[in-house]
Amino acid sequence: MTNTVIDAHNVSKTYTEGPVPVVAIQQIHLHIDKGEFVALVGPSGSGKTTLLNMIGGLDAPTTGKVLVNGIDITNMKQNQLIDFRLHNIGFVFQAFNLIPVLTAKENIEFIMLLQRLPKEQRLARTKKLLEDIGLSDKATAKPGELSGGQQQRVAVARALASRPQFVLADEPTANLDSASAANLLDIMEKLNRDEQMTFVFSTHDNRVIQRAKRVITLVDGKIANDTLQTPITHSEDS
Amino acid sequence: MMFFKIAWRNIWRNRRRTFITIASIFFAVILATLMRSLLEGVYNNMIHNIAAFSTGYIQVHKKGYWQEKNIENVMNADSNVLKLVSSTKNVTAVVPRIETFALASTGRQTSGVICMGVDVEKENDITKLRSKIVSGTFFTAKDEAVLIGERLAQKLDLKAGDSIVIMSQGYHAASANNIYRVKGIVQLGSPDLDKAIVYLPLHTAQQLLSLDNQVTGLSIMLNSSRNMNEVLHSLQQQIDTSRYEVMTWKQMMPQLDQMIEADGGSHKIILAVLYLVISFGVFSTVLMMLAERKHEFGIMIAIGLKKHQLTQVIIIETLLILFMGILFGTLAAWPVLEYVSAHPIRIGGELKKIYENYGLEAIFPMSKSFIVFWSQVKAVAIIGLAVTIYPIVHISRFALMKALRS
Amino acid sequence: MLIRIAWQNLWRNPLRSIVIILSMMTGLWAGAFIIGFFKGMINQQIETAISRQLSHIQIHHPKFGEEENILNTIKNGGNIALQLQQRKVVKAVSPRLLIAAMAATAHGSAGVTATGVSPGLEANVTSLGKYIAEGKYFDTTQTMSVIIGRRLQEKLQLRLNQKLILTFQNAGGEITAAAFRVAGVYTSNSSAIEESKLYVMAKDLAPLAGIQPGESHEIAILLHTNNEDEALAALLRNQYKDLRIETWKDLSPEMRLMIDSFNQYMYIIIGIILIALIFGIVNTMLMAVLERQRELGVLMAVGMNRSKIFFMVMCETIMLALAGCIVGLPLAWACITYFGKTGIDLSNWSQGLAMYGYDTMVYPSLDTIYYFEIGAMALAASVFAAIYPARKSLQLKPAEAIRKI
């Protein structure tokens, strides 16, 4: 049974801030179903980040609409949108994802605090996620005391903490060495498999692209290619 | 609680800056506290002296007496008024007094004096008159004798045991001349009084002035000057105001009140400028806290923190800094106040003369009263309100995409 | 070159620089204005005191003030006054009798100082004639008239032409009483004076008091300018060795102290404000240095030596202060000049101020030199504030600073 999580309908985005209007995205149609593991690729300036931001409700499209789980998020008010993101979408950014003054454990718990989950639930889920990302021993470390790879793993854990519909990751491995990148991908794959979590990530790293189940290529703000593939995994548990 | 934790940790991300900012508030608070305390102390002392030695915090007298200061406007000392006043809440003492002008003469020299007929025991209770004797002895209620101010004694070249002639105008224009022995010489601390005061036992004064049991006024002492208006209203409701008049020292001596207000005002302006400059410093700290965390704020909003929650965090941070400044400032000022209020600074030299010319005791007591600290809290709270306006506006206009791209 | 870099650096974070410049500006402006205001108040007080109460110089019997004795007179006071009048620097002279008395009416009595004057001479010294609010100044053809202060009039409920009984001890030691008719009521800026000082004609008072014509208790001398007083006082002290000669500064120690302590007062106020400013400057410059770690590292790596970096940070700080001065001090000057012309009305507090001899209009004024002094203090403070951030900038290690991207 297929279940559409993301439905982008005829979405365009034009930036008018500069001296010349820049068309970043042109009339894109995109469906992503629950449990997909999608890589968004393309040269820089092709509109990957813009598309991710609009799917994630961080930025509004100029025309067209975005439905998440059947709900139109394009016309939501600001606070409504923030609330929607909190409960429905997980984010992993390129770098500096975490709140610097909170420990790894607190960063993960923070999002559930915002959701007003009861304490036992929060603690149990935090514990489980820390185990999933293999950082149980670093629970009380602050972001500054973690390596870049560890920080991104905590970011992934935090993104999942709220039990979102899907997780958006914008170049999550851009600042990582290849071992850390592979490790992060392992964790994402595992969570995709175990928790049926949908991941959409942008990247231009070939090794990362290889591990996606579906690859969408953007060129000049349009979808140039959208293919399903059998991921090549290197991880020990596959 | 989580927000508080985040705020608390955030302000220590840049220890140096936080310390300097706290130090600036600390400096302002300690300076302002000491200044206010000194002002309050000096003025409270002055008011207390004046209240105790002459008018009382509140005075009840025959209607019209204060306007004319006339011996014809006397009231009966045993009236119900006395009982009524004594039983009023917050009143610690009611002292009957006869106050009139007289000439005091030694035969060779004459001087204008304030002739004060007092209830010896009650007077001693509130003014500790007995302890102000510098030579001779205290008098009793039955003595036909007087106590005179130290400077008056110098002026008239009088020693304890000498005689003095008091000339005044008695009740119903009766003549009022008599000779008295100077039983003691008192030093009251207020040069104005020391230069002019002559104390007589109440009964002796009544005889001199051809009065039966009358007095010119009832001076009322209170447990605290803060209760003055409350007592005033309560007395005004109960006392027959068509015959009697109830006045506070502020009404009796408006110039003094205004002088205190004006002097206090000029110091408050200086403190306001100080706080203003400090608040600029706090503001620039807030500005830096906001500027350097743009990206972080972007992430926080992206993952689901609402703007008003983010604003809360910033406000808590600002308030924490302000609170620590005022806490440490107060804690540092406290021992100084504690010490000085127990051991008031006595001043000497030329400054002493000037103080005395103004009729003040040359003493710098400090007040530990709540208002001294409270006014600093208020000042810092105003700074807090002013500097948090910016983050509120800043966050509400916060452009998420820009912040994330930075 | 360094100065240009420093200047440009300031405008990389304009809001922050503007906040500091604004705080400097506000602090200096308010500080200078407060000082100008106090200076104006002091000037006002001195003017009033000299023109209405103390005059420039007063001559008394050496024991005057120490003991209350009617016999402590200047024997040839009239002659001395005449001689003084001949001097060029002297504008007016008034010999006076001063006698402690009780003033009584049917409505009550009050202690007063009866001042016996020659109407014409007194009017030239204290302009008493100009301050008659009710009735008229002395008419020399009449006798036994008195001019009383407004407060005393209210206290004793006197109307014009009513009688007032003055009782005092005469030179022979006897109690004397005489009735005077109220000819006029004067007002003063000081309510204490209005209540306690009344004027009669010396020619009426002297015979009653048993004082010879030509004797005086006090001679008040008014000069043409304020700055001749010390010289003339010195001269007179030489000439009349057996008399006490005092300038207004001697007579009023609080005024002398006020003048002497004005500079101290200025340093304290400006000092407090500058200390408060220093906190803000140190903080801002420190942040400016720390957030430029990498850039400063690059500058050092390409060969800019430490002293130049130190100098650059110093320059930036001083520029901020200078900008604050350039805006703040002229603003203060403009305000002081404006209000110096129009005056500031303090009549809300006037009763309290008048009690202590203040006028209710204050005309702020500040000599030009003070602006420069304040400016110099502000620059010195900024140099002081720059030391810590500038030293911090030197402690950066180029390699480390560059690595921190």
Image (cartoon, grey):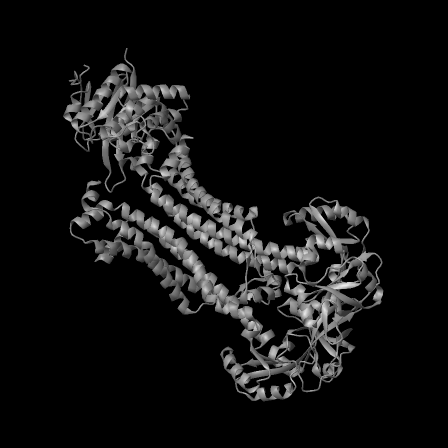
**Quarter containing the C terminus of chain A:** top left
Residue B291 is drawn in which quadrant?
top left
Residue A213 is drawn in which quadrant?
top left
Residue C324 in sight from this viewpoint = yes
| B268 to the left or right of A96 | right
User: Up-down: is B187 above or below C94?
Assistant: above
User: Up-down: is B276 above or below B109?
Assistant: above
User: Up-down: is A149 above or below C345?
Assistant: above
| B332 to the left or right of A38 | right
Residue C236 % position (x, y): 55, 84
At 34% across and 35% down in the image, what residue appears?
Answer: B297
Of residues A182 and B307, the one nearer the viewer is A182
| C143 to the left or right of A193 | right
At 58% across and 87% down in the image, what residue appears?
Answer: C85
User: Up-down: is A156 above or below C185?
Assistant: above
Residue C294 % position (x, y): 22, 45
Of residues B306 and B377, the one nearer the viewer is B377
Residue C198 % position (x, y): 69, 74
Residue B85 % position (x, y): 75, 48
Residue C335 in sight from this viewpoint = no
At 49% across and 52% down in the image, what residue appears?
Answer: B32
Looking at this view, name the residue that lies furthest to the top.
A1
